[in-house]
Image (tube, rainbow, N blue to C red):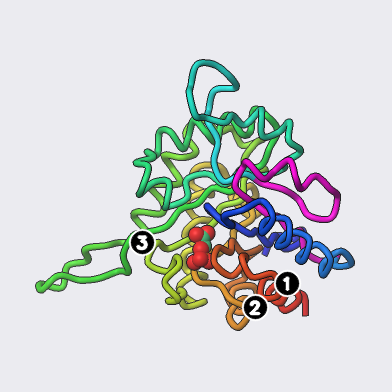
Amino acid sequence: MNNNKLLIVANWKCNPATQKEAEHLFVSVKKEIKKIDEVETVICPPSIYLSLFKQKVIQLGAQNCFWEDKGAYTGEISSSMIKDFGCKYIIVGHSERRGYFNETDDEINKKIKSILKNRLKPIFCVGEKDRDSFDSEGKLINEMSFIVSEQIEKGLIGISQSKIQDIAIAYEPVWAIGTGVPCLPDDAMKAALLIKKTLTGLYSREIAERVKILYGGSVISQNAIDYIKEANMDGLLIGGASLNASEFVKIIKRVII
Ligand code: PGA
């Protein structure tokens, strides 16, 4: 495991529906974790709420960005603007963006470059759509290892080795996201080893060891610790459970025991 603090990231997605609810959720989490120093807690709210949350206890992240700093790109928010809001992280390549918004590996690569150029840290999501399965002849039809290494190789094209340690890679099998069907810790560990192997091929073993690897997909307070202790993950990316302040705080408290 990477030596630094555990990284626990809340991905609020397109929630909550009002500013009042968002403030309530943020304040409730902050109040409970202000004395916890063992983890780096990051909240990634919808970008429109970011300016409400400037403070020092919780790091802020965005859920997406555009790759140009500014210009005629209606509807987009750039990583330089996100930096200006006091954020440290940007989630990139989330499967919901790949799936619903047709984001390609090439676009994800441009976003990662723009995030790094603006001295922010990408949380780069990768993961296969379906669980490994076999056709009637016993041939593998969904290969996690192939999909995940391809996403990493394409997403990191042109990223120099001096920048790679600013990236955290989140392994999020799509079939586990929001389904209540989490990945077995053992399988998450296999994915983490594959990610390290892919990074070793692209850079070196030493560099690969410095990259934080997170797990995401139906993490709750009952299973969170398994990914840290059994799968040796450096942190977690949490969707649904991060919208409930007491459950999210419980996750943070459980992983530091
Ligand atoms: P989930 O989402 O925790 O609700 O499964 C994780 C994610 O999408 O990052």
State which mark lies toward you, 2 or 3.
Answer: 2
**Label 2 vs 1, first from the N-terminus:** 2
- Indicate whether residue 49 is drawn in magenta: yes
State which mark lies toward you, 2 or 1.
Answer: 1
Q: In the displayed structure, does residue 31 sit left or right of residue 134?
A: right
User: Which residue position is annotated with label 3?
Assistant: 144
Q: Which mark is residue 225?
A: 2
Q: Label 3: few (<14), some or many (≥20) within 10 Å?
A: many
Q: Residue furthest right?
A: 35
Where does residue 225 sit, x and y in percent of width and height?
Answer: 65, 78
Residue 200 versus residue 185 in the image, above or below: above
**Label 3 vs 1, first from the N-terminus:** 3
Q: Residue furthest top?
A: 71
Q: In the displayed structure, does residue 200 sit left or right of residue 145?
A: right
Q: Quadrant of the N terminus?
A: bottom right
User: Which residue position is annotated with label 1?
Assistant: 249
Residue 88 versus residue 38 in the image, above or below: above
Mark 2 and mark 1: Cα distance apart in space: 13 Å
Q: Can I make out residue 165 in this image?
A: no
State which mark lies toward you, 3 or 1.
Answer: 1
What's the magenta region?
A: 37-61
From the viewer's side, name the closer residue of 254 and 212: 254
Where does residue 217 sit, x and y in percent of width and height?
Answer: 49, 67
Q: Secondary structure at mark 1?
A: helix
Mark 3 and mark 1: Cα distance apart in space: 31 Å
- Indicate whether residue 141 is drawn in magenta: no
